[in-house]
Amino acid sequence: MATPLDIELAAAIAFDAQGLDTTTLHNIFNADAMAEWLRAGTSTYVGLSPVTSSFSALADSVGFMIDCLEGQEAALVYADYVVMTQGAKHLRPVADAPKHVARDTFDFGPLLVCRRADAIKALTPCPPLCETSALYALTLGLQRLGHLYHTGVPVGFVGETDNRDSGVKQFDYVNPLNVNVQKERELIFAEHLKTIGALTPEPQQRAEVKSHSKFARRASVVIPVRNRVGTIADAVKSALSQHTSFDFNVIVVDNHSDDGTTEVLSHLAAEDDRVVHIIPSRQDLGIGGCWNEAVASAECGQFAVQLDSDDLYSSDSALQTMVGKFAEKPYALVVGSYKLVDFNLEDIPPGVIDHREWTDHNGANNILRINGMGAPRAFNTEWLRRHPMPNVSYGEDYAAVLCATRKYLVGRVFDVVYLCRRWRGNSDAGLTDKAQAAHDAYKDKLRSDEIEARIAMNAKR
């Protein structure tokens, strides 16, 4: 009968060949402490438990993970787990790792098993003053030694401690309290990219984006929409209220709404000829596909500026600020800053999201580690026509940002020019575990594919 193995919080454990507990390290986030513990031990295998709640594993699960480590010739093995919430149990499956796992929030579950010798190699060398990110440095280093294997078999029980909404958790990495941790992990990740040949150098490749097309206007505000009858009029009127020194229009791609949105847009277009109401002939479009429809239109201006169907610009000068940035340098992309508000436009935590972690020196690399870059996004239309968004409804903008930062200059506006309204209708709010996992998996694949593209690009230099 399996023997329960109660693992202390955030600890590393040494195992012999039978998977028995021999020694324990209680600080797995400090690189010096972990390296010293690894060098002092003699066991073949080690397990790392990053959970911050109670965790009870089964000894036979540990043995099974060791068998997988050897049988699959992997560098790291991780597993699913069962979450205990108020006495109820539910399975928390984790994702298969893509070739490159860049995100420091990737869920490896409550127990990671690897060889001690591999762990020592993975942490050598480690950037100085790695006080909180040793586990992240270790998983990156193990990827350089081999593949990461997901068993798909639950390893034990974990007590749920973070019951926050998915739309709240996603902003943890921009919390001012985490600034030092994020800077530490940025350095670790940059060193990893350099080691595998994926680091985008500074200065970046300067690729002039020249316009060979004649545009009837300077800019277009692009609003993809489906079934937002309660918010679409506010968004369109926010765009129309912009004061600019150039001509612009508002292209609304109405993705076959059936809740009254189409009728609202028809009325707005009849009132103001700057509103271009497009209903695609295709029935299979996601948000990315709607963007491509807008950008391909002859009505699209030289620059295409984002406005989501439930959001607003922060002032009547926002469009002038975003488009004006393109006059400074040949940017393919300009990204602004936004403030989180509720449906009544009252400020809500964490407030301003300005992504000041972006630097011209290393922003193009760090964007591969984090979940986003900010809003609104404004694109050189000709560039976006050559690099269309994937036809999906989540991560389409992130894919475009990754592509742009691979070679092209990116402009940043750190003043708040956008109000992001958080409400129950947001596409990233209140997600189930399964839906959140699907979102994370898609962005993880985008990151992995982009790292491969950058390795290939650098090999040609």
Image (cartoon, grey):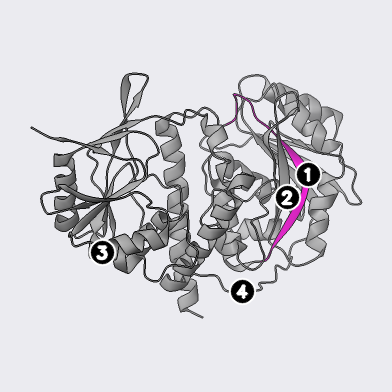
Q: Which mark is residue 417?
A: 1
Instruction: Provide the residue designation for mark 4.
Output: 202
Question: Nearer the observer, disc 2 or disc 3?
Answer: 3
Instruction: Provide the residue designation for mark 2.
Output: 336
Which picture quadrant has residue 400? bottom right
Q: Amino acid at mark 2?
A: Gly
443 w.r.t. 404: above or below: above
Closer to the N terminus: mark 4 or mark 2? 4
Q: Residue at x 70, y 71 (%)?
A: 208
| Disc 1 to disc 3, C-alpha distance | 54 Å
Closer to the N terminus: mark 1 or mark 4? 4
Q: Residue at x 42, y 39 (%)?
A: 438
Closer to the N terminus: mark 1 or mark 3? 3
Q: Amino acid at mark 1?
A: Val
| Disc 1 to disc 4, C-alpha distance | 28 Å
Answer whether labels 4 and 2 touch (C-beta < 8 Å).
no
| Disc 1 to disc 2, C-alpha distance | 6 Å
Farthest residue, direction bottom = 461
Question: Residue 251's spot in the image, x, y percent?
Answer: 73, 40
Instruction: Provide the residue designation for mark 3.
Output: 40
Q: Secondary structure at mark 4?
A: loop
Answer whether labels 2 and 3 touch (C-beta < 8 Å).
no
Principal SS element in the magenta part? strand
Q: Quadrant of the N terminus?
A: top left
Answer whether labels 1 and 2 touch (C-beta < 8 Å).
yes
Which picture quadrant has residue 152? top left
Name the side, left or right, on which 93 lies relative to 376: left
Closer to the N terminus: mark 2 or mark 3? 3
Look at the image and say whether residue 392 sits in the magenta stretch.
no
| Disc 4 to disc 3, C-alpha distance | 40 Å
Q: Which residues are magenta?
A: 409-426
